Image: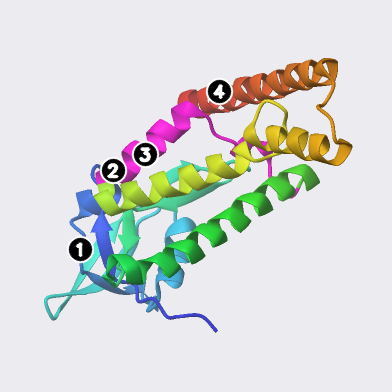
C-alpha cells in the first residue's frame, strides 16, 4: 500500500520546458498522448521515457480542460542513459505543528535520514551504489542553490539532510574524525591506560590520508559533473 499522489503540478522551475510551454502551479495533468496519468508516478514515467520527443498533455486548470504539447529535455544519468525532464515538481499538503509537537516528528525524521545515510555507505562498500554518487563542496553548493530557487522550505530541508549526513560521516571510526576519538577513548577505558602516543600519531596520519583522498575524489567527481 502507498498513498496516492495526484499528478498535480506543485511548482514549475525557471528556464525549463514546462515553463516555456506554459504549465503552471495547480495544473492537474490527466492524460499524456491520450493515456491516463492520474498519479504522479505515472506522469514521471511518461516524461522520463520521452526525452526529446513531443508529448501532448491534457490538463485541468480552473475547472477547464486544456491541451498542451511539451518536449521534455534530455538529461544524462550516471549510468549513461538519458531521461526526460520537464522541470515540474509535485504538489504537497502542508502540515503545520507547534514547536513542542514537532519535536518527536523531527527526531523520527533525523533517525530515518541517519539510517538512510548508513545504508548508502554500506551499499557503496558492497558495490550496490556507485562511488560516482559521492559529491563534494561544488555539488553541495549547486544543490543548495537549486533548492533555494524552488522555495526556502526546500533549501532548509536540503541543509538539514546535509547536516545529518555530515554528522554520520563524522562519527565513522576514522582517527582524525570524532568517531575515531570515541574509539581511542573506548580503548583507553578498556585498557585502563592511555593509547600509546605512536599509535595515536599513526592513527592520525592514516585518518589524514583517508580524508584527504576522499576530498580529492569527491572534488574530481564534482569537476566531471561540472564539465559534462
Q: Give percent across and percent down for residue 29.
A: 29, 72
Give me the disc on residue 148: 2
Residue underneath mark 3: 144
Seen in the image, is 18 located left or right of residue 215?
A: left
Part of the protein shown in magenta = 128-149
Asked if labels 4 and 2 touch by Cβ distance under 8 angstroms, the answer is: no
Question: How far apart are the two marked residues, 4 and 3, measured between alpha carbons?
Answer: 16 Å
Residue 5 versus residue 114 in the image, above or below:
below
Seen in the image, is 95 located left or right of residue 124?
A: left
Mark closer to the chain start, 1 or 2: 1
Mark closer to the chain start, 4 or 3: 3
Q: Determine the residue located farthest toward the bottom in the rendered image.
A: 1
SS state under label 1: loop
Mark closer to the chain start, 2 or 4: 2
Question: How far apart are the two marked residues, 1 and 2, measured between alpha carbons?
Answer: 18 Å
Q: Which quadrant is the N terminus positioned in?
A: bottom right
* Mark in front: 3 vs 1: 3
Residue 144 versus residue 58 in the image, above or below:
above
Residue underneath mark 4: 219
Q: Give percent across and percent down for residue 95.
A: 29, 72
SS state under label 2: helix
Q: Residue at x 63, y 34 (%)?
A: 178
Residue underneath mark 1: 25
**Does 185 lie within the magenta span?**
no
Give the image quarter of residue 209.
top right
Q: Nearer the viewer, residue 29 or 97?
A: 97
Amino acid at each position: 500500500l502507498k498513498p496516492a499522489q495526484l499528478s498535480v503540478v506543485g511548482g514549475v522551475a525557471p528556464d525549463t520546458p514546462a515553463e516555456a510551454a506554459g504549465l503552471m502551479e495547480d495544473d492537474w495533468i490527466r492524460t499524456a498522448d491520450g493515456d491516463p496519468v492520474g498519479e504522479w508516478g505515472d506522469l514521471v514515467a511518461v516524461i522520463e521515457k520521452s526525452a526529446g520527443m513531443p508529448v501532448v498533455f491534457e490538463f485541468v486548470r480552473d475547472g477547464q480542460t486544456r491541451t498542451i504539447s511539451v518536449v521534455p529535455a534530455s538529461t544524462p544519468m550516471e549510468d549513461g542513459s538519458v531521461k526526460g525532464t520537464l522541470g515540474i515538481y509535485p504538489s504537497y499538503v502542508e502540515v503545520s505543528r507547534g514547536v513542542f509537537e514537532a519535536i518527536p516528528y523531527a527526531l523520527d525524521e533525523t533517525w530515518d535520514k541517519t539510517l538512510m545515510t548508513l545504508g548508502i555507505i554500506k551499499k557503496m562498500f558492497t558495490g550496490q551504489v556507485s562511488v560516482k554518487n559521492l559529491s563534494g563542496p561544488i555539488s553541495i553548493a549547486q544543490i543548495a542553490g537549486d533548492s533555494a530557487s524552488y522555495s526556502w522550505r526546500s533549501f532548509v530541508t536540503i541543509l538539514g539532510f546535509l547536516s545529518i549526513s555530515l554528522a554520520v560521516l563524522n562519527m565513522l571510526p576514522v582517527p582524525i574524525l570524532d568517531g575515531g576519538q570515541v574509539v581511542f577513548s573506548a580503548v583507553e577505558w578498556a585498557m585502563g591506560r592511555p593509547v600509546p602516543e605512536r599509535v595515536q600519531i599513526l592513527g592520525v596520519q592514516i585518518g589524514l590520508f583517508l580524508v584527504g583522498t576522499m576530498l580529492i575524489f569527491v572534488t574530481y567527481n564534482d569537476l566531471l559533473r561540472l564539465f559534462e
